[in-house]
């Protein structure tokens, strides 16, 4: 007959080592908490840098100028062009690292992630109006933005967009002909007459890549997983409809007024009103 000489409360094995390990883990946790190195602290640091609110440029004349701070808004998908910082870099980064992918986000509040500065390619001074067919750079903000340039190049077998396999768009550190863009009228019938005319903010237009002659596109059929949720994949690809005109995925709007963003939503009423005024059409209230 076996006699039970201990109960389940008796500590057996390496119980002392287990207790010491738990105490060490707790001590490391408290040390990281005091130094602000926990993931929640790093996330808060990201929110206070890359996602902090910024003010856009606003001029009373309604035109887009060299040196303006703008957001690129796609009326079709109701999204804005944004830097897609990877989750691993997002926790440590104090600014947008290079190279960096881009996506089209529903977070339309102006911040270093989705705000760009229009830079001249031909030496035009800041404050001069941007014209159709004029080459320019799209650069992120200094400091938190990292001063990166919107870049694209021909798609190859090993270098293309992840899902659509179209021409890739990303942010790079140095400027070149691959980072040069130009504005074209979205209506093909008015495209020739609009060359050399100043660009109005709030109008639909095309952003064309100078080297490859492909238009910036926000793809509604393809989404990418980001640290900020599901967002649309961005490519440089001219998508034509049955009338041989660019589809709405290629249509963009220069937003230069922060007051148009209310409660995290971009009010398209102001954009439509401004577009109707430029065309001489009556404004529908």
Image (tube, rainbow, N blue to C red):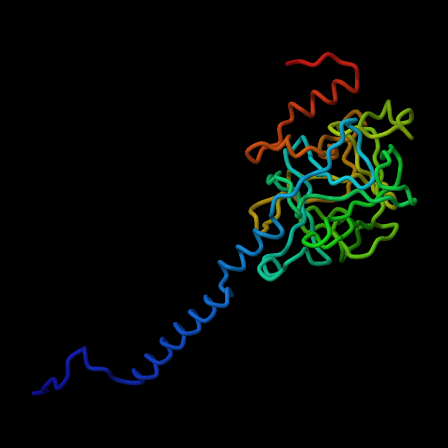
Q: Quadrant of the N terminus?
A: bottom left
Residue at image position (36%, 76%) is 23
Q: Is residue 18 left or right of residue 9?
A: right
- Position above or below: 279 against 263: above
Rendering coords of residue 242 (x, y %): 77, 26
Is residue 15 shown to the viewer in this render?
Answer: yes
- Position above or below: 281 against 188: above
Q: How many marks?
A: 0
Dividing the picture into quarters, in which one does residue 213 lie? top right
Rendering coords of residue 92 (x, y %): 60, 62
Is residue 252 shown to the viewer in this render?
Answer: no
Rendering coords of residue 137 (x, y %): 82, 45
Q: Pick the residue in front: 217 or 260.
A: 260
Q: Quadrant of the C terminus?
A: top right
Q: Is residue 70 left or right of residue 226?
A: right
- Position above or below: 90 against 193: below
Residue at the far left: name it: 1
Rendering coords of residue 113 (x, y %): 66, 47
Residue at image position (88%, 50%) is 177
Residue at image position (61%, 33%) is 261
Dividing the picture into quarters, in which one does residue 14 lie? bottom left
Residue at the far top: name it: 282
Q: Pick the residue in front: 27 or 84.
A: 27
Q: Pick the residue in front: 7 or 194.
A: 194
């Amino acid at each position: 007959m076996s006699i039970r000489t201990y109960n389940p409360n008796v500590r057996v094995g390496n119980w002392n080592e287990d207790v010491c390990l738990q105490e060490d883990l707790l001590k490391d946790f408290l040390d990281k908490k005091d130094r602000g190195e926990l993931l929640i602290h790093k996330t808060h640091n990201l929110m206070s840098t890359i996602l902090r609110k910024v003010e856009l440029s606003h001029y009373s004349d309604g035109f887009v100028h060299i040196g303006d701070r703008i957001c690129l808004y796609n009326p079709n998908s109701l999204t804005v062009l944004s830097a897609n910082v990877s989750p691993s870099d997002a926790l440590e980064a104090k600014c947008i690292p290079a190279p960096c992918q881009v996506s089209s986000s529903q977070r339309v509040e102006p911040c270093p992630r989705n705000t760009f500065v229009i830079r001249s390619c031909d030496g035009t001074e800041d404050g001069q109006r941007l014209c159709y067919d004029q080459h320019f750079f799209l650069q992120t903000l200094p400091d938190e933005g990292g001063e990166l340039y919107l870049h694209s190049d021909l798609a190859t077998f090993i270098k293309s967009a992840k899902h659509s396999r179209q021409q890739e768009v990303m942010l790079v550190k140095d400027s070149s002909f691959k980072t040069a863009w130009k504005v074209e009228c979205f209506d093909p019938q008015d495209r020739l007459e609009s060359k050399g005319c100043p660009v109005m903010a709030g109008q639909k237009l095309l952003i064309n890549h100078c080297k490859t002659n492909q238009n910036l596109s926000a793809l509604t059929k393809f989404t990418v997983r980001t640290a900020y949720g599901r967002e649309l994949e961005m490519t440089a690809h001219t998508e034509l409809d049955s009338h041989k005109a660019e589809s709405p995925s290629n249509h963009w709007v220069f937003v230069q007024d922060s007051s148009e963003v209310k409660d995290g939503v971009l009010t398209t009423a102001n954009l439509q009103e401004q577009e109707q005024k430029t065309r001489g059409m009556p404004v529908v209230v």
